[in-house]
Amino acid sequence: MSRKVVRASKFRHVFGQGVKADQCYDDIRISQMTWDSNFCSVNPKFVAMIVDASGGGAFLVLPLNKTGRIDMSQPTVCGHTGPVLDIEFCPHNDNIIASGSEDCSVMIWEIPEGGLVTPLNDPVVKLEGHSKRVGILSWHPTAHNVLPMFTTCPCTAVRRVRRAWATCPRGAWRSTSVKSLGFTSSMRGSASPLS
């Protein structure tokens, strides 16, 4: 006589409960780009999502307390000429977000304290000089204003990842009038100025 044995699991009697509609985000046009990205980034103040946009790339930044149905005319952050591939909030300043795009550039944006009221078109800093699209962004977890960017380039059948580190002077994030700074980027060990 065989006896059926039930596998012991500490999650056996745990069930999830769905949130109510007023606690969700609804009617957001998430980007249809097929890229290895989360398409969103969250910090203690804001949630940002890459959205479909014509004529370039854009992403939406919403305060965490604004839930429910999102109006189609909600202001976006748009400044890239190609689709946005990745976004990432700065771990040291909740109002700073970086965006990487297919147009081979990275832009650093400063979100106003209460969130976006009008579309944001001018970045605080624009990092140019990449030869390939910028697909992965990740702020350095302990060093202030250090942003590693990863660009991929197809090479025969293998995809290689190149690293480029861009650093910014400490006071550059404080001013929204900064357009170009003397950034340095090291790609394969060589330093080059970016504008």
Image (spheres, rainbow, N blue to C red):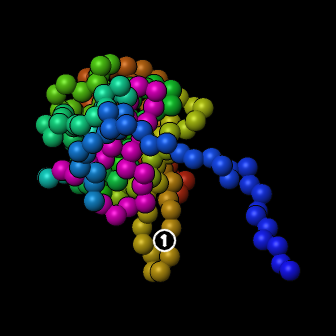
Q: Is residue 21 above or below residue 189?
A: above
At 37% from the left edge and 37% from the top edge, which residue is drawn?
20
Residue most toward the right?
A: 1
User: Bounds of the magenta span?
Assistant: 33-53
Residue 158 x/y as whole percent: 50, 76
The quadrant of the picture occupied by the C terminus is top left
Q: Amino acid at mark 1?
A: Arg
Q: Residue at x 19, y 25 (%)?
A: 117
Is there any visible trace of residue 23 in the rendered image? yes
Q: Residue furthest front?
A: 1
Q: In terms of image quadrants, where is residue 32? A: bottom left
Expressed as whole percent of the image width and height from the top left, the position of residue 103 reads 27, 55
Q: Going 30% across and 28% down the picture, which residue do you hit? A: 66
Q: Where's the N terminus, which quadrant?
A: bottom right
Task: Classify 81 as above or below 109.
Answer: below
Spot occupied by residue 65 in the image (x, y as percentages of width and height): 35, 25
Q: Secondary structure at mark 1?
A: strand
Q: Position of residue 129 (x, y in %)?
A: 34, 51
Q: Nearer the viewer, residue 118 or 104?
A: 118
Q: Is residue 190 above or below residue 63?
A: below
Mark 1 crowdedness (10 Å alpha carbons): few <14, some 14-19, many ≥20: few
**In the image, is residue 90 part of the stretch drawn in magenta?**
no
Instruction: Please state the total of marks drawn on the protein image.
Output: 1
Q: Is residue 46 magenta?
A: yes
Which residue corresponds to mark 1? Answer: 159
State the residue in front, 193 or 95.
95
Judged left or right of residue 60, residue 171 is right
Tell which of 46 and 9 is nearer to you: 9
Asked whether residue 132 is in view, the answer is no
